[in-house]
Image: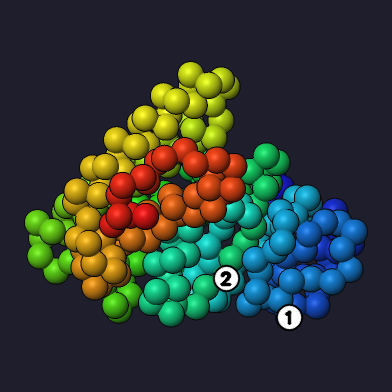
Amino acid sequence: AVANRRPETRCKAAQAAIASSEGRWRIFKSCQVDAFASILNVHLESPYKCNCIYLEDLKVTDPMTLVSPHLCPYVQRAAIALSERNQPYRRITVDLSNKPEWFRALSPLGKVPLLQIGDQVLFESAAILEYLEETLPGPLHPADPVARARHRGWIEFASAALNDIARFYSAADEAGLSQAAAGLRTKFERLEAEHSGGTWFAGQAFSLVDAAFAPVFRYFDVFDGISDFGLLRDLPKLA
């Protein structure tokens, strides 16, 4: 296993990074990179191309580490929930097209996000959001049990919208594009009807539903630059 390789089998950049970090690890973009990302600023401009990060290098004392690719809507939910609470965390960028062995060992499903707390690793964005809700101050779920359960349902609704968006931007032909657009439009009409009309989904308080839908609507910066697909037409609460 990669984790059991001898230290001298790491690339020179990895050896130098680990040796210079006083017991902590640092991440780098490739085996040829001379400078390393700061341990408190690990979000790189592009995924690294080297698999020379080892499990023993991940045993750190920092409270939380978020593992993700460069851009992922499910990771963004967790990042938003952490940022809304001003919770410090580190971020490791992983290339999912070339998953390193340490990532495969940590992720039961081979998916992101992962959230590492000490020696424990959480997987699946819904589980991570619930953990943050239960352990950090500043709740982002409603206090009322029924409202809280409904919010969980709308978070799942956001996941379904992301699936429709994936079908939309990867459509092979016009028919597929139209079908995906119709599915998205139906979901947005339903969301419009449920939306409070206030600043956020449920009024003036930011919630985890808003964190889940923020990555959905970020796609529209790209979509609107291509054409007017009418996905939010006459939906003033969302638009």
Say which amino acid is labelled 2. Arg
Which quarter of the picture shows residue 172? top right
Q: Nearer the viewer, residue 210 or 22?
A: 210
Point 43% across, 50% down: residue:
216
| Circle 1 SS class | loop
Q: Nearer the viewer, residue 3 or 178?
A: 178
Q: Residue 209: which disc? A: none
Q: Is residue 84 visible?
A: yes
Q: Nearer the viewer, mark 1 or mark 2?
A: 2
Residue 34 in the image: above or below residue 172: below
Query: In the shown orientation, is residue 189 left or right of residue 14?
Result: left
Q: Residues within 10 Å of mark 1 (few under 14, many from 20)?
A: few
Q: Residue 90: which disc? A: 2
Residue 70, position in %: x, y? 63, 55
Q: Which quarter shows the N terminus?
A: top right
Residue 15, position in %: x, y? 83, 65
Point 55% across, 40% down: residue:
227
Which quarter of the picture shows residue 131? bottom left
Say which amino acid is labelled 1. Glu
Q: Which quarter shows the C terminus?
A: bottom left
Query: In the shown orientation, is residue 58 left or right of residue 196?
Result: right
Q: Nearer the viewer, residue 119 or 32?
A: 32
| Circle 2 SS class | strand
Point 41% across, 40% down: residue:
230
Q: Which residue is mark 1?
A: 22
For the residues labelled 1 and 2, the Cα–Cα distance comes to: 17 Å
Residue 220, position in %: x, y? 49, 49
Q: Residues within 10 Å of mark 2 (few under 14, many from 20)?
A: some
Residue 181 in the image: above or below residue 80: above
